[in-house]
Amino acid sequence: MDDRRAEAAWRRAVRAVILPDVGHVLLCRFTFPHPVVPRGPQVVLAAPGGGIEAGELPLDALRRELL
């Protein structure tokens, strides 16, 4: 058995908590398999957002992702 552990690559990201109405929150539904998560859960719910590109400000990245 190989005991070496894969190194995780860190990626800066932004997420938004959007409350469209009292008692509701907007979530994105991701279904798998997905290139980022090839094995694991079949469905994941997450707040909308995404990765920050090199040289990009977090707020600009969030605006881009929400569009």
Image (cartoon, rainbow, N blue to C red):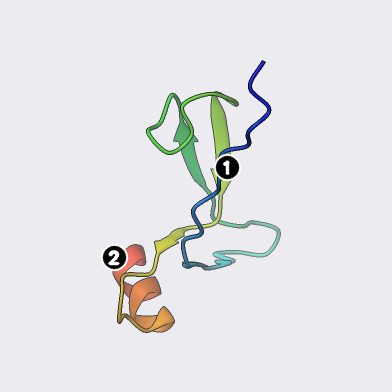
When asked about the image quadrant of residue 33, the answer is top left
Amino acid under disc 1: Leu
Q: Position of residue 5 (x, y in %)?
A: 63, 37
Front position in the image: 26 or 34 = 34
Viewer-proximal residue, 21 or 5?
Answer: 5
The residue that mark 2 highlights is 67
Residue that label 1 marks: 45
Percent x, y of residue 26: 54, 55
Does the residue at mark 2 contact the one at mark 1 (Cβ under 8 Å)? no
Q: Left or right: where does residue 4 sit relative to residue 48?
A: right
Local crowd at mark 1 within 10 Å, few (<14), some, or many (≥20)? few
Q: How many labels, in total?
A: 2
Q: Earlier in the sequence, mark 2 or mark 1?
A: 1
| Residue 67 horizontal/vertical position (percent) | 28, 65
Image side of residue 26 versus residue 36, left or right = right
Please give left or right for residue 33 compared with residue 2 in the image: left
Name the residue at the top extreme.
Answer: 1
At 29% from the left edge and 70% from the top edge, which residue is drawn? 64
- Which residue is located at x 63 percent, y 22 percent? 2
- In the depicted structure, whether residue 4 falls above or below residue 45: above
**Mark 2 packing: few (<14 Cα in 10 Å), some, or many (20+)?**
few
User: Observer-nearest residue: 47 or 5?
Assistant: 5
Which kind of residue does numbered mark 2 sit on?
A: Leu
The image quarter in which residue 62 lies:
bottom left
What kind of element bears circle 2?
Answer: loop
- The numbered mark at residue 63 is none
Q: Position of residue 39 (x, y in %)?
A: 53, 23
Which SS class for mark 1? strand
